[in-house]
Image: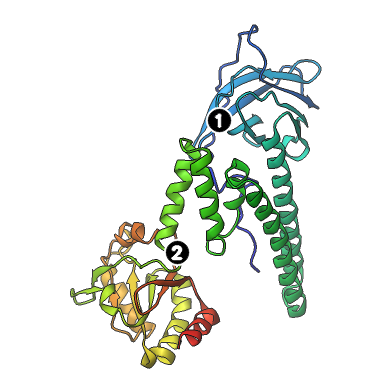
């Protein structure tokens, strides 16, 4: 069943949140004006509450407050520019907000479960983020329920089909809501969070829309810089783009270039002998090659063999080619594993990974497997 990637609530596609200790120094300047206040029920007197700033790659402590006998706390750290922030009691009990200069938001929540109970006033983008988070949680709960139902009835094929329909429907509903957020204001940090919850393959135009808007609205933001870099990498492999050329040696040490196959429809297939999913997919690629080769279909196989745990990577590679009956001649590798030059060139994060090219060497599609590959080739031929 196709479900969302297993990510932790709202922003984890945007940020790599590093665990950090509760080492922020308490703010002892009582004369400073409170900028962010809150009221936490079910929270013991004297409990420390922390304010963190979230960059695209890190979490930076900014302020500390203490809950009084009525559950009230206040931060005095001045918000100078729009950004993602986190209010937390610890690294498991927190809420993420979008705060802007001049805002004086008020947070209310049950201190035993901040994320699940919070309300926010005085911060429009934070309220939008709360609704966005709620939409994600509703879908996540649906997917979880469907998954447990399938585990209880693994042999019921009719139920499985119905569950797939329900799963896709729930995801579509969530994605439609995310699209409405983006279309309303593509240059906001809520839109940045929303678009990165959506599949880039199917929604690349939305990624570009958000990126272009952020360039106009927040050209100097670290979030814009980080997202622009991400979209730029995606653009290299966007449909219609010319595929980066590859020149590597074959099993006999002779160089072969991907560009030498122009005039053919080419599947650039990244795999390895040690990759079980790759080996499972290989028979399907062989079948496609046999079916469409005479009509102008070629396969250019790039192996990521050469891992440290492979004492004889080249022989592993050759043996896998023979065992899986990979009958085409275009097999190349630099035998460097994940250090291969093709990994950053094609922005590869996992294998199997495949790119289908037209006769001019331009990208048609990525990661077509099983019947999808055969159906696309049937369209082309």
* Depth order, front residue of 96/264: 264
Is the residue 296 above or below the residue 370 in the image? below
Is the residue 106 above or below the residue 174 in the image? above
Front disc: 1 or 2? 2
Which quadrant of the figure has residue 282? Answer: bottom left
* Depth order, front residue of 122/71: 122
Q: Which residue is mark 1?
A: 53
Q: Position of residue 313 (x, y in %)?
A: 29, 68
- Sequence-earlier tag: 1 or 2: 1
Q: Residues within 10 Å of mark 1 (few under 14, many from 20)?
A: many
For image coordinates 60% across by 42% down, the residue present is 188
Q: Which residue is mark 2?
A: 238
Q: CA distance from mark 1 to mark 2?
A: 33 Å
Q: Position of residue 325 (x, y in %)?
A: 37, 86
Q: Which mark is residue 38?
A: none
* Depth order, front residue of 276/127: 127
Disc 1 is placed on an element classified as: strand
Q: Position of residue 253 (x, y in %)?
A: 18, 73
Disc 2 is placed on an element classified as: loop
């Amino acid at each position: 069943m196709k479900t969302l990637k297993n990510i932790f609530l709202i922003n984890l596609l945007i940020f790599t949140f590093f665990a950090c200790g509760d080492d922020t120094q308490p703010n002892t300047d009582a004369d400073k004006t409170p900028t962010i206040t809150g009221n936490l029920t079910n929270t013991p007197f004297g409990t420390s509450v922390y304010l963190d700033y979230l960059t695209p790659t890190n979490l930076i402590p900014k302020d500390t407050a203490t809950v009084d006998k009525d559950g009230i706390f206040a931060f005095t750290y001045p918000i100078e520019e729009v950004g993602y922030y986190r209010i937390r009691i610890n690294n498991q009990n927190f809420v993420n907000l979008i705060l802007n200069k001049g805002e004086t938001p008020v947070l209310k929540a049950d201190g035993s479960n901040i994320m699940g109970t919070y309300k926010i006033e005085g911060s429009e983008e934070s309220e939008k983020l709360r609704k966005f988070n709620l939409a994600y949680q509703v879908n996540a709960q649906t997917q979880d329920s469907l998954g447990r139902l399938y585990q209880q009835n693994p042999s019921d094929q009719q139920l499985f089909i119905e569950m797939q329909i329900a799963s896709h429907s729930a995801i579509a509903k969530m994605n439609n809501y995310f699209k409405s957020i983006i279309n309303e204001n593509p240059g906001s940090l809520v839109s940045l969070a929303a678009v990165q919850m959506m599949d880039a393959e199917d929604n690349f135009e939305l990624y570009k829309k958000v990126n272009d808007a952020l360039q106009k609205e927040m050209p100097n933001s670290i979030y814009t810089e980080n997202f622009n870099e991400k979209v730029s990498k995606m653009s290299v492999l966007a449909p219609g783009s010319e595929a980066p050329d590859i020149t590597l040696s074959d099993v006999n040490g002779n160089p072969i270039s991907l560009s030498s196959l122009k005039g053919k429809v080419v599947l650039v297939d990244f795999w390895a002998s040690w990759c079980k999913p790759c080996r499972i997919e290989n028979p399907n690629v062989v079948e496609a090659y046999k079916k469409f080769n005479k009509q102008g279909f070629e396969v250019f196989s790039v192996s990521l063999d050469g891992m440290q745990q492979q004492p004889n990577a080249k022989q592993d590679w050759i043996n896998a080619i023979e065992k899986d009956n990979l009958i085409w001649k275009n097999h190349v590798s630099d035998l460097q594993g994940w250090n291969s030059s093709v990994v950053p060139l094609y922005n590869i994060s996992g294998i199997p990974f495949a790119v289908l090219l037209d006769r001019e060497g331009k990208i048609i599609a990525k990661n077509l497997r099983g019947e999808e590959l055969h159906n696309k080739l049937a369209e082309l031929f």
